Image (cartoon, helix red, strand yellow):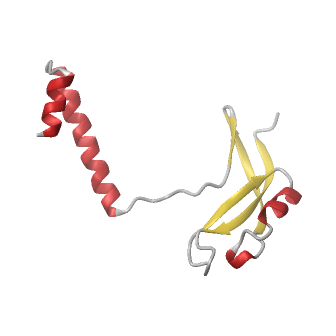
Amino acid sequence: MSNEMQAYVAWTNTDLTEGRGKIIPLAICKLKATAIKLGKGNGVQGTDCRVSPVKLIRSMDGWYGPINLIYPTPEDTARDEQLKLSAEAIKKAKELGFTKEEIELLKQA
């Protein structure tokens, strides 16, 4: 079996009113006819989605292709850093012998 496969993507927009959002995949299909069918009327203001070919890559047990990757905001980045520091502190507390109850009390303080 090949590690690559030709597929078709029906592309839509996150803002279906004015088209000012991001272009994202609505459907990834093995056949172009399926992508056209699923994209019909699902574009900006009810237009048909643009359909284009894409190469999918097989990795372990699945096929991988275009995705809608959401990038973090500055607030997300700051919160993620806080979560990492908190997890590190909890790990240290456990290594020092703190119980779950004691750790929960510290979290609430």
Of the 4 image quadrants, the one containing the N terminus is: top right
Query: Which of the two residues, 99 or 6, is positioned nearer the viewer here?
Result: 99
Q: Is residue 88 left or right of residue 64?
A: left
Q: Residue at x 75, y 76 (%)?
A: 47
Question: Does residue 12 sit above or below 100 in this rendering?
Answer: below
- Which residue is found at the position 31% from the left and 60% from the top? 75
Task: Tell me where residue 93 appears, x and y as whole percent.
Answer: 16, 26
Residue appearing at x 56%, y 73% in the figure: 21
Question: Would you identify the image quadrant in which residue 85 lies?
Answer: top left
Q: Is residue 6 above or below residue 74?
A: above
Drawn side of residue 20 relative to residue 31, left or right: left
Q: Position of residue 24 (x, y in %)?
A: 63, 63
Q: Residue furthest top?
A: 97
Image quadrant of residue 48?
Answer: bottom right
Residue 57: where, in percent of width, then height?
71, 44
Outermost residue toward the bottom in this view: 18
Q: Looking at the picture, how far across and down is residue 88, in whole percent?
A: 23, 35
